[in-house]
Image (cartoon, rainbow, N blue to C red):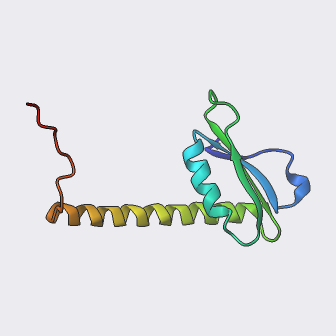
């Protein structure tokens, strides 16, 4: 099994509703991806569960009013990657600016008498 699979039994709902299983993933990806996909206009439901803490997998459910769930998942992963890249870029820029021109001494050791 790869890192992503579909749960069997979803065939009756056409392509609009699917549950995907991510191997070796958990709340970090689940919550971030859910927050991106839930904003899409044709998504009726988007959620995830981690069935058991001892299992390294996450179930991710998407239900659409229009379009295919797999397309929403693909778009969500791409948009999340762009968001992470943008965040990393902005953080790096701010850090470089801070290193050039530190305004305050962020870490001050307490003086011991």
Image: 15 above or below 58? below
Q: Quadrant of residue 86?
A: bottom left
**Count of residue discs:** 0
Residue at horizontal 28 percent and vertical 65 percent from the top? 94
The answer to whether 19 appears left or right of 99 in the picture is right
Q: Is residue 79 above or below residue 13?
A: below
**Residue 108 falls in image quadrant:** top left
Residue at 54% in and 61% down: 80
Residue farthest to the front, as pictured: 113
Q: Residue furthest right?
A: 12
Residue at point 15%, 65% (across, down): 101
In the image, 15: left or right of 21? right
Q: Quadrant of the C terminus?
A: top left
Query: Compared to 36, does 113 lie above or below?
Result: above
Please state if 110 lies on the left or on the right of 12 as rendered: left
Q: Residue at x 59, y 43 (%)?
A: 27
In the image, residue 72 lies at what x, y percent? 69, 64
Residue 6 lies, in percent from the top left, at 75, 48
Q: Is residue 42 above or below residue 80?
A: below
Question: Of residues 110 and 74, which is closer to you in this image?
Answer: 110
Q: Position of residue 71 (x, y in %)?
A: 70, 65
Query: Which of the two residues, 41 or 57, is positioned nearer the viewer here?
Result: 41
């Amino acid at each position: 099994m790869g890192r992503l699979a579909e749960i069997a039994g979803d065939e009756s709902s056409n392509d609009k509703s699917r549950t995907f299983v991510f191997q070796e993933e958990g709340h970090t990806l689940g919550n971030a991806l859910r927050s991106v996909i839930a904003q899409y206009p044709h998504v009726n439901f988007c959620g995830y569960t981690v069935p058991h803490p001892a299992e390294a997998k996450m179930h991710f459910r998407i239900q659409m009013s229009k379009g295919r769930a797999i397309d929403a998942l693909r778009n969500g992963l791409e948009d999340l990657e762009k968001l992470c890249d943008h965040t990393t870029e902005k953080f790096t820029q701010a850090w470089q600016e801070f290193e050039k021109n530190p305004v305050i001494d962020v870490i001050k050791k307490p003086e011991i008498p």
